[in-house]
Amino acid sequence: MAAASCRYTLQAMSLKTAVRGARRWRGAAGVALVTAAAVAGAYAEANPRHHYGGLHLTGHPPLAAYLLLALPALALAWRNARPTAVFWLTVAGTAGWAALGQIAGAALVPVMVALFWVALTRPRRVAIAAGLAAAVVIFVTEGLLGPFGWLGGPNATMWPELLAAGALGAYVAARRQWLAAERDRAARTEQAREEETRRRVDAERMRIARELHDVVAHSMAMINVQATAASMQLAGDPDGAAAAIQAIRTASKSGLRELRAILDVLRQASTRPIGRATSFAAWNVG
């Protein structure tokens, strides 16, 4: 029995370890995908062969400049521990990229992911303030130093993108809170049901105990009275003594039969699962 319990415990621990490992791998894969999307997208946008509404970029930025996007994107691995700090790191990277005169389009991908996590894990007012402040920083940087000026390029498209990222994070957070509240409510309801069942079981046991006491006490009192009468009549009245002994026999048989009936009920109740559908009427032996 102990070996089986130990085996089941080890299996449960290995399953939990496997689940945690799978989650870590998924998280690492997501961070790598965001990093690749930001760097590859920024490289494509910086290609001097592309023309954007008459805009012609002179050349790619130096390779070291791509660290402004890669390092903040890689920092998303710590999004659960420090979501706000990671968010501002992505904002700084995007603003730095825009300050180089580049198009901050794909560079907004890490910012949107980080803003989603801020909205998911922090209060709503914190997420709104962070999103607005980040949008202002990127808007001003892009307007002053970016290739499209104040109203073109990312300055025109980032507002709905950031709004969508923040709204999605807030929705997921609200749904998680609702599900947690529902689980808590169900747990409290189940606990209250179990407590009520336990209370009714205890009350029924007390009733059966009282009946058992009454049956045994009545039978023993009858046997005692008849035994006393038999001992007094044994010498002078054999017939009366025989009747008293017969009464003792009858009373003992009746008491044993009632006691056996009560014990049978208790035995059946102990093997029946106790739950909401348990019928306590079946325990009634009165």
Image (spheres, grey):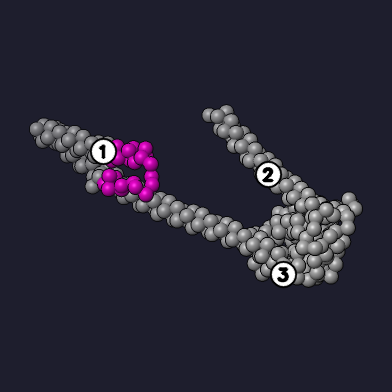
Which one is nearer the viewer's eye here, 51 or 75? Answer: 51
Kindly report the distance in space between the C-alpha atoms of the residues bearing marks 3 and 2.
Answer: 30 Å
Q: Is residue 158 magenta?
A: no
Q: Which residue is mark 1?
A: 261
Q: Position of residue 143 (x, y in %)?
A: 81, 70
Report how far apart the C-alphas of labels 1 and 3 lie in the structure.
77 Å
Name the residue at 55% across, 29% down: 4
Task: Find disc 2 in the rendering and name its residue.
Answer: 26
Q: Is residue 140 visible?
A: yes
Q: Which residue is mark 3?
A: 132
Above or below 268: residue 128:
below
Q: What's the magenta region?
A: 261-284
At label 2, the amino acid type is Arg
Give the structural element (helix, strand or loop) at label 2: helix
Q: Position of residue 134 (x, y in %)?
A: 75, 66
Q: Which marked residue is nearer to the observer: mark 1 or mark 2? A: 2
Q: 29 and 104: which one is in front?
A: 104
